[in-house]
Amino acid sequence: MASADIELQNVSKVYYKDRLEIPVIAGLDLKINPGEFVAMMGPSGSGKSTLLHLMGGLDQPTGGTVRVGENYLENMTQIQLTKWRSQHVGFIFQMYHLVPVLSAAQNVELPLLIFKGLSSANRKERVKTALTVVGLADRMDHRPNQLSGGQEQRVAIARAIVTDPDVILADEPTGDLDAKTSQEILNLLNLLNFEFGKTIVMVTHDPKAAAHATRTLHLEKGELERDEVNAPRPAAGASA
Amino acid sequence: MTMGYIVLQNLRRNRLRTALTLVAFALPMGVFVLAISLLAALIEIGNMNERELRLGVHHKVTLINLLPDAMRRKIEALDPERKRLTAVCGMRWFGGKIPEEPAPIQSLAADADTFPIVYSDAGMTPEDIEAWNKDRQAAVVGYGVIEQYKQKYPDFKLGGRVSLKSSVPPYLELEFHIVKVIEKANRAQTFYFRRDYLTESLKEAGVDSPKCNIFWVKCNGADELRELQTAIDQEFSNSADETKSEDENAFAASFTQALGNLPGLMNAMAIVVLVIVGLVAGNTMMMSFRERTRELGVFKAMGFPPIRIFTIVLSESVMLAAIGAIIGIAPVWIGLTFYPLPKLGVLPIASLKASPAAAYISLIIAIAIGAAAGFWPAYQAMRLRTVDALRRVA
């Protein structure tokens, strides 16, 4: 069971398009403690996804430092970041992005293929455990088109946790789901945070989803507008 | 699960597109194996001819123009001591065919006395030569002709009596007695019979024409062949019947090229087809890559190294090409191995057999095309920025 803290100091990110400078994040400071479940909210273009990408080492800051656990991401090469991601970060996306021609178990096994020295039996054991955690042990051989949207997102969550990452980064994980299924997914994230101690950062537009987190960050034009500690989370299974 | 399994499964995403691309590989690769096998057969025949040191002397204008019978003695007189030539055999085109069949048989009337010497590669034994000399209707027939007709016409066998009708005036129909079956590939499609039989039959039909289309001169060596080639053409220069002498390979090549430079045409077509296949495969792989940009972005986010992404996309292209090529090559290979084509039109080929080299070369070419077609999409996938790919998600 692994967990890590995240610290951003004076982070800025500027994109360039047709020689035009587009600042997205400007001088942002942020500290997320190990085992925290943080929701990031804000209007479109406020820099939520960019911040998530910076924390996950998918992109590098224009200025400032991004530290996840012991690692300063701005100093790492692309190859180092790739390897680091495979071992320390699990991503969950809005559209699940499962490989349609692979079964649920095979989709979950994907991140383990780049782990050296892991036997086939060991991989299968890990896959089974991950799918059991998300409640889909009986759907291992189903292909994505044989699963509901909520089940697909569960498989995607199993894929994110199968490597036992320190941090889970979720980009609108309930954005494509109905209220009931969203609730199930949020309960699952709560479980991963509460029972397994995972540090979770979730981007969302939905205040009800954000209420499941222990803390909510409000971003506006690339700056941290508000940082709120949430009321105790709703009990698992309660309506969103 | 292995990476190979993922690559294979990826080909199942769009089955119709995969099937069409496989066909796009299979068809030209099958034809390619046929073409290379055909060229290999032609080269093999050329090599056989080269060893026989025969010089063909025909009219300078065209092979159709007949040469006088007396020319044989004049050619022999160029080397009375037989230091450079062994024998001269006059031949006349008969153009015979089985009356009930549309296709002609390459049938030639040859001088009875010198045919066994000039065509020693026909492998006639003393008994065969005796039978040939004794019977004016004797015929020496290639195994390709026998194989082609023996089922429908059981008399096409050693000792059988068969009739051929000439396709040139006066359209004689002659009966022959098969006294020898030639087992050599370079003579497999030819039907030889005695010229004295033809001359007498023509005379009976009111045509007194003891003439030849070509004289084949068997030489003692390669140097002698070149010397005689010059000497013969010089001998008949400025005469009514000027000659053109060619070694047997050059003669066969010019004969084949009369069909329209077939090897050159085949090469040109093969190159065009291969380029088209490459473009089709490249287009398929590019479409496949574009459709999966987001997914590849997720792979990168999961920590798949760029080289692994490159390998996945490239392997798909190579696997598609290899499977397509095998689908195309296998039936042609199996077909030619178990049912070698007995005859291919007018080409001087006895049977078209599967050439292992043709199969290997075709497979290698297909894989090379697959790799070339997949390289750019694979490179694009490798260079893809993860955030750019993921932005297409959100």
Image: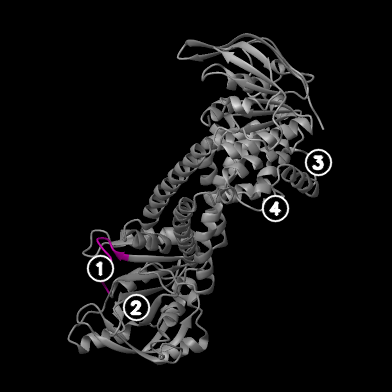
x, y (%) of residue B63?
28, 66
Badge 3 crowding class, 10 Å Cα cut-off, few under 14, some 14 to 19, many 20 or more, is few
Chain for numbered disc 3: A
Nearer mark to the viewer, of 1 and 4? 4
In space, the residues marked 1 and 4 are separated at their CA atoms by 84 Å
Marker disc for residue A138: 4
For label 1, count other residues whose C-alpha is less than 10 Å away and answer few (under 14), some (14-19) or many (20+).
Answer: few
Q: Are marks 1 and 4 in contact (CB under 8 Å)?
A: no
Q: Position of residue A40 (x, y in %)?
A: 62, 21
> In the displayed structure, does residue A49 sit left or right of residue B71?
right
First along the sequence among labels 3 and 4: 3
Residue at disc 2, secondary structure: strand
The correct choice, above or below, for B65 with respect to B136 in the image is: above
Which stretch did the figure color magenta? Answer: B58-68
The residue labelled by disc 3 is: A117
Amino acid at the residue labelled 4: Asp
**Amino acid type, label 3:** Gly
Check if mark 1's residue and mark 3's residue have beta carbons within 8 Å.
Answer: no
Q: CA distance from mark 2 to mark 4?
A: 77 Å
Residue matched to label 1:
B64
